[in-house]
Image (tube, rainbow, N blue to C red):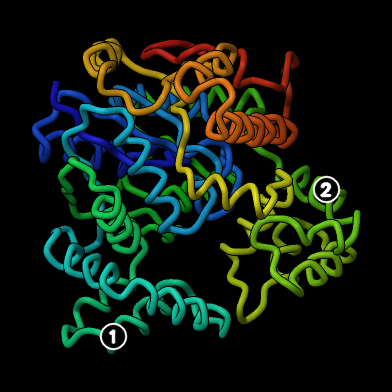
Amino acid sequence: MRAVGLITEYNPFHNGHLHHLQESRKAADAEVAVAVMSGHFLQRGEPALVDKWVRTRMALAGGVDVVVELPFPWACNSAPRFAEGAVRSLDALGGIDALCFGSEAGELGGLQACADLLLRHEDVLSRRTASLLRSGLTYPEARAQVLAPLTDDAALAELLSTPNNILGIEYLRALRQAGSPMRALTIPRIGAGYHDVEAVGAIASATGIRRLLAEGGEVAQLLPEPVRPILQQALAAGRDIDEEILHRLLLARLGRGAASLTALYQVEEGIENRLAEAADTSRSYRDLIDAVKARHLTRTRIQRLLSYILNEVGREEMEEFLVAGPLYLHLLGCTQKGRAFLAGSRKRLGLPLVANYSRLHATLKRHHGAQTSRCRLAERMLVLETRATRNYTLLMKRWEGGSRNRDFFEELRFEGEGL
């Protein structure tokens, strides 16, 4: 079965995602669509609107055939790390012919040229970009400014000024670095931009939809018809997050003092003091971010940093994870067609595929070797993932009870299931 891979967050699944899915199938001539989807904490550092199982059901209702989770270390990280983890996860599934992503450019030529340029000058770009980020530029601004002197083509630098192009270039770079057999495809993004809060016709960005929901607005027309009741039921049941709870949990953790933060991932010297001081006066999650924000600290970086703090993500451990890459695949849901695809590609799996974590320890030992460092690292990755899930349950507006270790008990989602 021909399969196309998609890299997603679906926060929530909307009409723009449906368009991308349908066009991706056509572009790849694919019978099956496989999505690797972020879990409970997303690329820009925010907790997801609703949990990963609700978002899986929305994806299946929208027409995706297989949903696999992108693990926390890559899901909640910079664009290059996000792309690297997603590409490696799709590769490990085996049998995926193409990766299709949306972009403002809408064609591969310039994006691939830009990705190749980044690969050729990777060390220089990394150092110069980091320096410009510390001076207060955004990631797109820094990348474009560093790239401009390396090419005579001003259009290449311009490609790095928009968010979907940036991700697309990182996907292309990750494909090359991984030596992936997946061919790359892109389709033009339509309607509202990634950060736009206003709808264009029946299409709005996920950011705009979340803003509308927070303001009590109507979003039904912006979601595919089969997806609407899933999100509506989840919101009515209180399965979305409460930012006030998030703020209080962060204040409790930051209240342990600046010294308790120094071993955590991406807590650079001096940031721990800014965080501890801001915690003493902040009145909300947004206020906390604003109080920490500085010329060299963007809002997105602070949001990711707060997610690392909430989930106690150690610097050394995270760096080990990132070097090793994903060490297992968490299957969240599939359609009947998706099950047939997985059955047919089982022999090509590069990593163990599990539906919930109840048997994962034994599976990891069989795949990686019971006493190996790789197996031990996979089990530590599992601990981080389950911690993130437990913490996410604390953020929900209503908790219906049961074990908070949901990764061990939640069953595989199938097309058409109820809440």
Q: Nearer the viewer, mark 2 or mark 1?
A: 1
The reply, left or right, for residue 290 in relation to residue 188 is right
Closest to the observer: 122 or 301? 122
Residue type, label 2 = Arg
What residue is shown at x 57% (from left), y 39% (from top)?
49
For residue 226, what is the image quadrant? top left
Quadrant of the rendered structure where residue 278 is? bottom right
Seen in the picture, residue 203 relative to 60 is either above or below; the reply is below
Residue at image position (34%, 57%) is: 167
- Crowding at dot 2, Cα within 10 Å, few <14 / some 14-19 / many 20+, comes out as some
Residue 237 appears in the picture as rendered: yes
402 sits to left or right of 219: right
Q: Position of residue 114 (x, y in %)?
A: 22, 70
Residue at the spot x=57%, y=80% of the render?
Answer: 134
Secondary structure beneath label 1: helix
Query: Helix, strand, or loop for circle 2?
Result: helix
Residue under label 2, please give it. 248
Which residue is at the front of the view, 319 or 264? 319
Mark 1, residue position: 148
**Three-letter code, disc 1:** Ala
Residue 261 location in percent, x, y?
A: 79, 58
Q: Is residue 332 above or below residue 359?
A: below
Q: Is residue 221 among the parts visible in the rendering?
A: no
| Comes first in the chain, label 2 or label 1 | 1
Give residue 373's position: percent from left, percent from top: 57, 34
Q: Identify the residue at image location x=65%, y=53%.
A: 316
